[in-house]
């Protein structure tokens, strides 16, 4: 997101006076300062193994969004396949926990967010209809509404 902010500001975002370079330098630390990503992912798996009711609570929560979006339903099905095969799950820790996070995000968005936001999330993050770079969402989405929602008014 910070890199995209630089893209929006162009060269002005690169000069120290703009403040953005500091954000650019600081932003990667988010992935370690409250525990490195890999260790957090392993912790999440350990919690699921030690306290099966945690997994039940998670499944119950995402189950509340069942049927709301076919891409979300497919992602949940894929997650079940990942969780059913515990062989070498530590090696898949980041992949499995990322998918858990994505389906949880998706389930909350289809229940509580404006439909165009949930649609964009499900298409790109769950349905895979995007590139690896920013600005690659499918043009069929209601992109105008997304931009309008992010715009500061008043
Ligand atoms: C700006 C900043 C602020 C911070 N603030 C706080 C704070 O307020 N309070 C606090 O307690 N700590 C704080 N920390 C420390 C932070 O929590 C640790 O840096 C973080 O937990 C990573 O630990 P480490 O630096 O020892 O890296 P390491 O544990 O050595 O990790 C290095 C790499 O090894 C991997 N790794 C380590 N162990 C395993 C394992 N068992 N299995 C697989 N991979 C593994 C990690 O994923 C990572 O990729 C802060 C750090 C920073 C940079």
Image: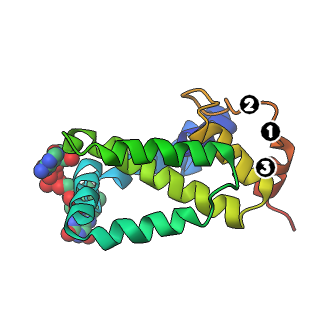
Badges 1 and 3: C-beta atoms under 8 Å apart?
A: yes
Give the side of residue 57 with respect to residue 89, left or right: right
Which residue carries the number 2 mark?
138
Q: Mark 1 or 3 closer to N-term?
A: 1
The quadrant where residue 54 appears? bottom left
Badges 3 and 2: C-beta atoms under 8 Å apart?
A: no
Q: Quadrant of the C terminus?
A: bottom right
Q: Position of residue 69 (x, y in %)?
A: 69, 49
Q: Is residue 105 above or below residue 11?
A: below
Give the side of residue 140 with respect to residue 91, left or right: right
Instruction: Check disc 2: other Cα within 10 Å, few if <14, some if 14-19, many if 20+.
Output: some
Gap in Å between the C-alphas at discs 1 and 3? 9 Å
Q: Nearer the viewer, mark 1 or mark 3?
A: 1
Q: Position of residue 22 (x, y in %)?
A: 45, 50
Q: Position of residue 23 (x, y in %)?
A: 48, 51
Give the side of residue 91 with respect to residue 79, left or right: left
Residue 146, numbered label: 3
Q: Position of residue 51 (x, y in %)?
A: 24, 71
Which residue carries the number 1 mark?
141
Whether residue 85 is visible to the viewer of this picture, yes or no, is yes
Q: Quadrant of ligand 1?
A: bottom left
Seen at 32% across and 47% down, the residue is 84
Instruction: Check disc 1: other Cα within 10 Å, few if <14, some if 14-19, many if 20+.
Output: some
Residue 31, numbered label: none
Badges 1 and 2: C-beta atoms under 8 Å apart?
A: yes
Q: Is residue 55 above or below residue 79?
A: below
The quadrant where residue 106 appears? bottom right
Gap in Å between the C-alphas at discs 1 and 2? 6 Å
Instruction: Check disc 3: other Cα within 10 Å, few if <14, some if 14-19, many if 20+.
Output: some
Whether residue 25 is visible to the viewer of this picture, yes or no, is no
| Disc 3, SS | helix
Q: Mark 3 or 2 closer to N-term?
A: 2
């Amino acid at each position: 997101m910070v890199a995209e902010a630089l893209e929006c500001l162009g060269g002005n975002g690169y000069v120290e006076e703009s403040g953005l370079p500091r954000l650019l330098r600081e932003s990667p630390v988010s992935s370690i300062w409250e525990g490195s990503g890999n260790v957090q992912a392993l912790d999440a798996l350990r919690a699921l193994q030690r306290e099966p009711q945690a997994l039940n609570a998670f499944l119950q929560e995402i189950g509340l969004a069942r049927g709301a979006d076919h891409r979300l339903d497919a992602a949940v099905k894929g997650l079940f396949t990942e969780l059913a095969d515990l062989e070498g799950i530590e090696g898949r820790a980041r992949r499995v926990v990322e998918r858990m996070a994505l389906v949880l995000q998706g389930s909350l968005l289809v229940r509580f967010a404006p439909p165009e936001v949930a649609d964009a999330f499900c298409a790109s993050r769950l349905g895979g209809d995007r590139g690896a770079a920013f600005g690659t969402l499918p043009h069929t989405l209601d992109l105008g509404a997304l931009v309008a929602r992010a715009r500061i008014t008043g």
